[in-house]
Image (cartoon, rainbow, N blue to C red):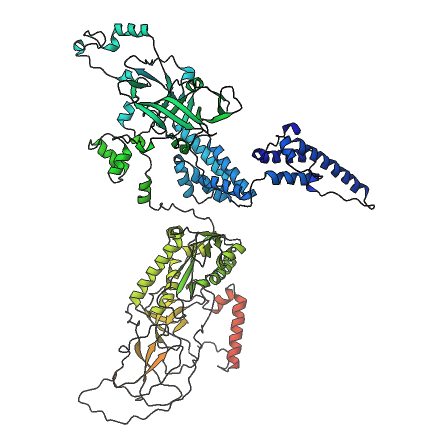
Amino acid sequence: MNLANIPILTGGSNYKKWRREIGLLLTLNEFDIALDIPKPVLTDQSTRAEKVDAERWVRANKVALSILESAMTDTVRGGIKKHDLAIDYLNAIERKFKESQKAEISHYMAMLTTYKIEGTGSIRDHIMKMTDAAEKLNSLDVNIGEKQLVFMILQALPSKFSQLKVSYNTQDKNWDVDELIAQCVQEENRQKQERGKEAEMVNFVQSDKGKKAFNSQSGHSGKNSHTKPTSFKSNASAKVKDSFKGSNNLKVKTKNIAKLRCFFCKTKGHLRKDCQVFQDYLKSKGVEQVNVCVESNLIEIPVNSWWFDTGCSVHITNSLEGFMTSKQTGFKNYNVFVGEGTKVAVEAIGIVCLKLSSGFVLRLNDVLFVPKMRRNLISASKIVKDGFGFLGDDECLKIFQKNHLDSVLGTAYLSDNLWCLNCTVESINQHVLNTSTKRMHCSDDSFILWHKRLGHISKERVLKLSRAKLIPELNFTTATDCVDCVKGKMTNFRKLDAKRCHDLLEIIHTDICGPFPTKTICGNSYFVNFIDDFSRFCYTYLLSEKSSVLDCFKIYKTEVEKQLGKTIKIVRSDRGGEYFGRYSEAGQCKGPFALFLEQQGIVAQYTTPGTPQQNGVSERRNRTLIGMVRSMMTRSKLPGFLWGEALKTATYILNRVPCKAVSSTPFEVWNGRKPSFDHFHIWGCKAEARIYNPHEKKLDSRTESCYFIGYSEKSKGFKFYCPQGRTRIQETNNARFFEDQDVADLSQGRFIFEEPDYEETSSSNDAYKEILITPSSEIELEEDQLAAPPTVDRMEVDFGTQIQMQGDHTSNSDVPMDSNTEVPHEPILPLRQSSRIRKPTMSNDYVYLQESEFDFGDVDDPLTYSQAMNSPQQSLWHIAMKEELESMSKNKVWTLVDYIYFSK
C-alpha cells in the first residue's frame, strides 16, 4: 500500500474513510510509532540503543507529517494549524472534521430500530449493513449485544420471512448473527426455487381506431423483453388464471358465422380479424408499436417502486398515486395485450413527478395508467429524448443530464435483473397535487374486501361461500395477513415437547407452592419441590417463608451430589423473586438464589412471563401432590395443620410408583433397586403404637391410641399423631394398624381424659380432669363449641403454652347407672396438687431409634447364632454379643451356670 491509494481529504464527507486508510498506511510502513510513542528525551546517560530509537522516532514523525499534509486539499490544509508532532496534527484534523458522538449514536440507533428490509437486493447485504451499524455503536460505547442484534434483524425482515421468525421463537437455542445469516440466505434461496422458471412477456398496446397499432409478434424479443420468475399462488381464482390465458385458448362459436358481418368491408361471412381487405389496409398504413415489459406473476412488489427499463417506449404505472395531471380514456380506445393476447385496459394518461435520491424532481410525461400491471416502468428512450442520460455497471445505474456527467441526479440498484430507482414514498407524495381526490380502488372481487365485510371470518369459510356462488368469485391473490385478525385472534403458541436429559442431575425443576391458610405444626406455610428431570425423583421441603428456598437448595445440592457423585448442571424455575430477583430498567437484578447459581457454575433457566407451562414438570407435580393431600385429609378428617405430613407422604409414594416420563419407577432410577411396598398403610388410619416411655409402670397400657401420618425420614419407623400425648408427633416401628376403621373428626377441639399425676394418690373413684385439646396452630374455636357439660369444669391445654388449672371435680357422666339404684352422696374432697408446672419427660423433638433411611423388608437380621457367625458382619455381631453379656453380668440379670445336657 502506498500514498497513491489514499483518498484525498476534501472535507467531512470522506473523513472516516481517509482516517482509516491513513492509519493503515502508517502502520504498514512502521511510521505509527510517531503516533503511539511519545517523543523520546535523550540525556548524557542515554545508551546507543536509546539514541537509535530516538532517531527512528524522529524520522517516523517527519514522514508521517509529510503524508498527512500531502493527503488533503489545499483548502483543508490551509484551515488547519501546523504542528511539529504528527499526533498533534492528526488530533487537530480530527477535531475539525469529527462528527458529534451523540449525533452518530442517534443516527445508527435510529437506523437499527427503524430499518426495514423491503425485499429488494440480497438479504445478506441488508444484514451486514445492520451488523456494521451495531459495530459502530459498540465503538461509540453503546453496547449492542449479539442477542439484541438478532432480534432487531428479525424485526426488520419482510413478511415473507415470517416462517423463519416463528421457527426461531419456538426453538430453545439462540442464534448468533452468523447462524441467522445462513438461515436467511437458505430461506431466500428456497423462495426463489419455489417461484419456478422465469417467464418472458411483452405487452403490446394497440389503438382500435388506428392512431396506434401494437404488434404481438414474438420477433421483438432480445433486449426489449425481460424475464421474471413465475410464482402463481395455488389458491388463485379461476378469474385471475383466465386473465393470463392466451388468445389461442379462446373458442369462437362458428355455427352462425355465415350471419356475421365484417365491420371493415361490411360483407357477411367473416370477421374483421379475418378480413383480407383489413389486413392489406394495415400493411399499407404501417404499424406503430410500443414494447413494454410487464410482470407475469403474482409476486408482491411495492406499489411506489419505479423500475428503469431500456426496452420500454412509454412510461407505465399501476397506480394513480403521483399523478399531477391525468386524462381519462375510454376502454375501447387503448388496450394492453398481455402475453398471448389477453386484453388489459389503459384507463388514463397523465404526468408523474418523482423525487430522486439527490433531491432532483424527475418529470415523466404521457404516463399510461394500467391497473393490471405489476410494476411501474420508466422508459429509457423517453428520458433520453427529454435530455437525460444514464450509465450503469454491475452494481449501480446513474442518471445525469446530458453533457454533465459529474452531476448525478439519481441512482438505481440492481434487483432481480432489473434496475429499481431510488425514490421514497414521502418524496413522491409531496408532488401529488390531487391526493385529496384520489381513493384506493377496491374491486368487488377482492378477498380482503369480503373478509372485512363478513366480520373477519377465516379464509376457508370465504372460499366455501365463493364456491357456493353466494358471493362473487374472489381474487385470492390479495389474501394477505390481516393485522386486525392478528390483534383480535392471537392465541398462545402451543408448547412443543421439551428435550429430555440423558443423566441424573442434568436438569432440576423447582417451584414453590403456597401460602396455605393453615400453618403446619412447625409454622410452615409453603413447600418447595426439587425434581430431577431424568428420574423424576422428587425432594419436598416445607418453608415458613419463600426466602428460605436458597437454604433448602443448598441442603439438597450437598446431599444429592454427595450421594450420586454427580453435579447439578441446570436449574429450571419460574421468574419468581425468590429465584430470579427483580427486573429493572437496567435488566435483571439478581437475587441470592440467582447469584448462588452463578457462583456454582449452574445454568439458570427461567420461564417467560405468563407462561407457567414452560415449567410444566414442577407445576404438574404440585397439582398432583395437592390433589393427593386433599384426598387423604378428606378421608382421615385429621386436623388441618397435618397437611405437611400428608404432603411428605404423597411425595414418598410418588417416588415409588410408576411415572409416564420414565420406563420404571423414579426410586429405581435414582437408587438402582426396586422399592418395597410391604410397609405401606392408609394415611390417617387408627393405630395402636408402642411409644417409648421410660416411666411406664407395670399396669399401664402398653400402647397408645394414635393415627398414622407418614413414614420416618431419617429413621426406620413410622410417624404417628398422638392427640393425648405430651408429644403429639411420635416415631416408632412397633405399631398395629386398623385400616378398616373410620377416623373420627379431629379437625375441631375434642374432650379427652388424662390420668392424674403419678405423684398423688387417689382411690378408684377419684375424678379425672377433663381437658380440651386445642392445637397451637389452629384457629381459635367459638365459645359455644368449647362448652362442657354443666357438671364438669374443664382445664384448657394449649400446646406450647402454660397449663391453667380451673379446678377438679368428679364427673359421673360416663358411669352407667341403674335408674332404681340409689347412689350415696358423698362430699368431694379437694386433691392435693403441686403448684409447679411439670416438664415433659421427653422433649417435643425427641426421636427414638434413629437410623439411616431404608425400606422395610430390605434388611433381615440373623435369627440364630450360626447365621450371625456366617454373615458378612460376623465380627460386629461377635462384639455386640460380648457387650450384651457384659452388661447382663454387670447388672446381675442372671447367674451363668454350666450347661446341663438333656435339659431345656
Q: Is residue 296 above or below residue 169?
A: above
Extreme-right residue of the structure: 44
Looking at the rendered image, the quarter that the N terminus falls into is top right
Tag count in the figure?
A: 0
**Residue at the location (48% across, 69% down)?**
865
**Residue 203 pos. (x, y %):** 35, 18
Residue 196 appears in view? no
Classify residue 264 as left or right of residue 887: left
**Residue 386 pos. (x, y %):** 43, 19
In the foreground, 322 or 278 = 322
Residue 56 appears in view? yes
Classify residue 502 as left or right of residue 40: left
**Residue at the location (29% across, 85% down)?**
793
Query: Hey, which quadrant is residue 691 in on the image?
Result: bottom left
In the foreground, 823 or 352 = 352
**Residue at the location (39% across, 37% down)?**
163
Q: Is residue 556 above or below residue 691?
A: above
**Residue 822 pos. (x, y %):** 20, 91
In the foreground, 328 or 264 = 328
In the foreground, 51 or 772 = 51
**Residue at the location (37% across, 68% down)?**
519
Classify residue 144 as left or right of residue 221: right
